[in-house]
Image (cartoon, rainbow, N blue to C red):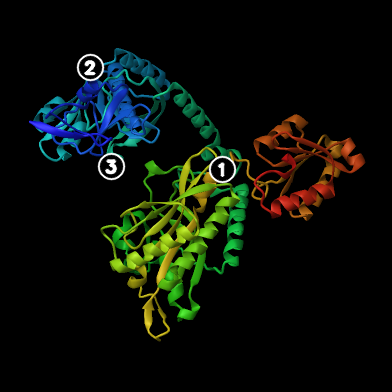
Amino acid sequence: MKIKVKFPDGSLREYEKGITPMEIVREMGIKKVIGAVVNGELWDLKRPLEEDCEKIRFVTLDDPEAPEFYRHTMSHILAQAVMRIYGRDNVKLGIGPTIENGFYYDFDIKNGKITEEDLPKIEQEMKKIIKENLPIERKTISKTEAKELFKDQPYKLELIEEIEGDIVTVYQQGEFVDLCRGPHLPSTGVVKHFKLLSVSGAYWRGSEKNPMLTRVYGTAFAKKEDLENYLKFLEEAQKRDHRKLGPQLELFILNTEFAPGMPFFLPKGAIVLNELMNFSRELHQQRGYKEIFTPLIMNEQLWKISGHWDHYAENMYFIEKDEERYAVKPMNCPGHILVYKSMTVSYRDLPLRFFEFGRVHRYERSGVLHGLMRVRSFTQDDAHIFCTPEQIEEEILGVLDLVNVIYKQFGFTYRVELSTMPEDHMGDEAIWEKATTALKNALEKANLPYKVNEGEGAFYGPKIDFHIKDSLGREWQCATIQLDFMMPEKFNVTYIGPDNKEHTVVMIHRAIYGSLERFFGILIEHFAGAFPTWIAPVQVVVIPISDKHSEGAKKIVKEFSKSGFRVFLDNRRETLGYRIRQAQIQKIPYMVIIGDKELASGKLSVRTRTGKEIRDLSLEEFVKTLREEVANRKLELTLEG
């Protein structure tokens, strides 16, 4: 039986059913192919084509799909190496997928465990498997055969039970066989450049009710240079890790015993948070927002009306008092609605913009908690705009401008995504169409390129998401703008229109920092802890060379304090070099060194945290420079220029 295969150039060829992409490649004389894309699906070179192929495209190591092939294969090479080292009978296999920039595999080791110290040994065995260049074969077998094949692998048996139909696929390389959908490389020797990165614990299938497995992470690249560059990137990211820098810079601590997922902010961290909030408050006040505060705990009936009870209860915290049940708020929206409903609102009063630094609590599994990035208690820079349908576009434009101003202040670039109506949506499609058009029009008027995610909006309305890029090129989803048709209807949130009748208001949810704690963590890593002077916890440290210079140094400290700067006197009985080094470790923007010469001349010797020295600077001149730098919230240190 013949099948038709269409190529990217539009040409159509006929082949015998069951031909493989590898046979086609050889016939056509195409070199360096590692896989294919068949009708949009990643396809092994050895996997037969059983029906007409509307489009086939071959994949080389330079194509964007290539990492999916070689990183998936590398996870199997990892599993094969572990079984060789620890013994087939001692290793129970979990899963081994590709992830962004790498791969992992989960293991249950019966007699022994894998530690970071074992990674070089495993790498050596992986290199042997790569050198053996074992052919990788894809096989389809019945579930009965698969159960027999994996009879000693309980996790694989669980997965087999959940596969629909009676046929499963397995991949074999040498003595190693794994349950897998693929795709894979033709053999184990195609890609050689890899590195195992870390070991961690991971519950089977992400549930705390299941056994804890050992997860080994790795990365792989087609080119040695790309691997080396990525490892340098990881090294730099590790230096910037906010979980390390936060305690080192005395910004925050985490107490996993008594408050897991709920960070404690130390005095220096509180300064940074307050500066972030003050900056945001100024901008919101200028744009007509009204700041409010809503209760942390409210009656469960509120959350039943809002829908959180049905859809979000497992992520909420509850308490009972006086035979009443209350919920700790996971979101601020219902509270803002209650404030709105406490007033009689005319169309002339709209838009109403309520703004709150609202503390919320959401239950997250302990396994996913991550420093400030994933917490159970956090503060949202939350705002809700209540407006008429005609005002949507203008209000979105205002939010887009505010997002740009705030992100520009920290040197962030960003990209934008627009998510549209999902299949499971609330409200009339005509309203959705009108709202989505308003979002598109606002983005286009703001000259913001955007990607459309069809059908990925929230069930209550379309949304715009912002992905900021930090100094290492990593992306973080922070700001969001969401239109909501559901909650105003549920709470009967209305305004009196020009016709003197009640109309349902449009509700715009938006946050720009998102989680203040998470944004703080991003900033720590973005600046590597070296904050711009305006948010630096300590802006100036005054260091007397010896005890006899301490009194003069205290007078200078007083002058800085009078001018409103955060200043610290370091007159410890340590060497000058040690104190300068400590100031650099603490990332303090400016150091003022006071000795005989400075006291005699009345001039200052100033050092920046990067080591640049400025001598014979008058106190008045330095204060003026600092005042301008802080007032303008400059990103760079003025005296570095």
Question: Given the current orientation, which residue lies at the most extreme right position?
Answer: 600
Nearer the camera: disc 3 or disc 1: 1
Name above or below for residue 68 compared with residue 629. above
Badge 1 marks a residue whose secondary structure is helix
Q: Label 1: how many residues lie within 10 Å, few (<14), some (14-19) or many (20+)?
A: many
x 66%, y 52%: residue? 633
Which residue was labeled with disc 2?
174
Percent of width and height locating residue 303: 35, 65
Would you identify the image quadrant in which residue 197 lies?
top left
Ranked by sequence position, the earlier of labels 2 and 1 is: 2
Ranked by sequence position, the earlier of labels 3 and 1 is: 3
Percent of width and height locating residue 190: 32, 20
Which residue was labeled with disc 1?
524
Q: Amino acid at mark 1?
A: Ile
Side of 261 where 595 appears, left or right: right
Q: Amino acid at mark 3?
A: Lys
The answer to whether residue 345 shows anywhere in this view is no
The quarter in which the C terminus is drawn is top right
Percent of width and height locating residue 136: 23, 21
Side of 454 where 370 appears, left or right: right
Percent of width and height locating residue 546: 83, 34
Would you identify the image quadrant in which residue 99 lies?
top left
Q: CA distance from mark 3 to mark 2?
A: 35 Å
Badge 2 marks a residue whose secondary structure is loop
Which residue was labeled with disc 3?
209
The answer to whether residue 205 shows anywhere in this view is yes
Badge 3 marks a residue whose secondary structure is loop
Ranked by sequence position, the earlier of labels 3 and 2 is: 2
Q: Label 2: how many residues lie within 10 Å, few (<14), some (14-19) or many (20+)?
A: some
Side of 440 where 305 appears, left or right: left
